[in-house]
Amino acid sequence: MKKPATSPSPPWTPLEILGLTIAILVVFFTTTSAIATLFLTLTLNHNPNLNPQVVAQSLQTNGWVLSIAILIAGSCSLGLLYATLIRRPALTPSQYLALRKPRWTAWWIWNALLVALMLLSESILRAFQQPETYTETLYRTTHSPILLYIAIVGIAPLFEELLFRGFLFHGLQSSRLGSGGAILISALIWTILHAQYGELILVQIFVFGLLFGAARTQTQSLFIPLSMHCLNNFLVLSITSMTLP
């Protein structure tokens, strides 16, 4: 006798989506904090006369520490995200995250829009005399530029896009909030994630988040905002490396 087919799991509610997203972010930041604490302990054991508060503050912008933290915390958080997705068999992780191959024209159009927005935002930052110095500090304090590129250009965009424009976006878009709500909320939470920057740069990040969300909506593919995010970080790091004395 045939067993009755198992009904697919119901979709998450918007509150459940937000809760799961926050839980994954908590894991990410807890892991990065643990790694930073380890570096702090090792540094103070090697130089006990140093001020712990000064050392802790310097580690927040240390490119070497950040690279290792992103590589480890990002990998752990991506594993948790995958484990979360496979608990809802109604859709495969690829379907849920919109891992669909887009048209080549979409790659060119949306990445060209990104570059245009980068040039515009850079001119605005210069007009207000608020240059972005965080990336410069990371580059100066890393022992391995290659590892920094892997973390900033590879792991960080992959984790953030899978979580925000993939997991969170799909759940919100499927609710009453629709595409507009998904674009707005994912961009807002993503901006809060970058609280280490100044106010004007946070506005810039929010606008970039809206553009990434629009690309995700129009192309129905996560690969487009992911490529835009990677390109943005690559250009920022590359320009920073070329302008350093």
Image: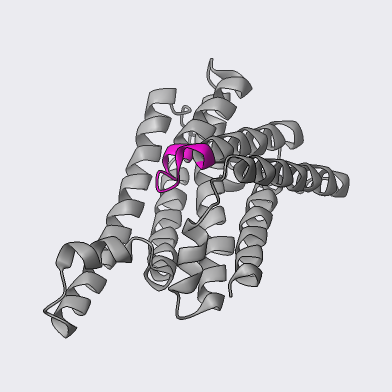
Which residue is at a point 43% across and 73% down the rendered structure image? 141
Which residue is at a point 51% across and 57% down the rendered structure image? 156
Seen as rendered, the residue at the extreme bottom is 46
Which residue is at a point 62% across and 59% down the rendered structure image? 236
Which is nearer the eye, 50 or 111?
50
Horizontally, is 52 left or right of 16 in the view?
left
Percent coordinates x, y for residue 99 in the rendering: 66, 47
Percent coordinates x, y for residue 121 in the rendering: 66, 41
Residue 200 sits inside the magenta stretch: yes
Part of the protein shown in magenta: 191-201
In which quarter of the view is residue 241 placed? bottom right
- In the displayed structure, 19 sits above or below 34; it is above
In which quarter of the view is residue 230 placed? bottom right
Q: Quadrant of the C terminus?
A: bottom right
Which is nearer the eye, 100 or 165?
165
Seen as rendered, the residue at the extreme top is 176
Percent coordinates x, y for residue 49 in the rendering: 12, 78
Which is nearer the eye, 114 or 17?
114
Which residue is at a point 67% across and 60% down the rendered structure image? 235
- Residue 216 shows in the view: yes
Percent coordinates x, y for residue 114 in the rendering: 73, 44
All told, the count of numbered labels is 0
Residue 173 sits inside the magenta stretch: no
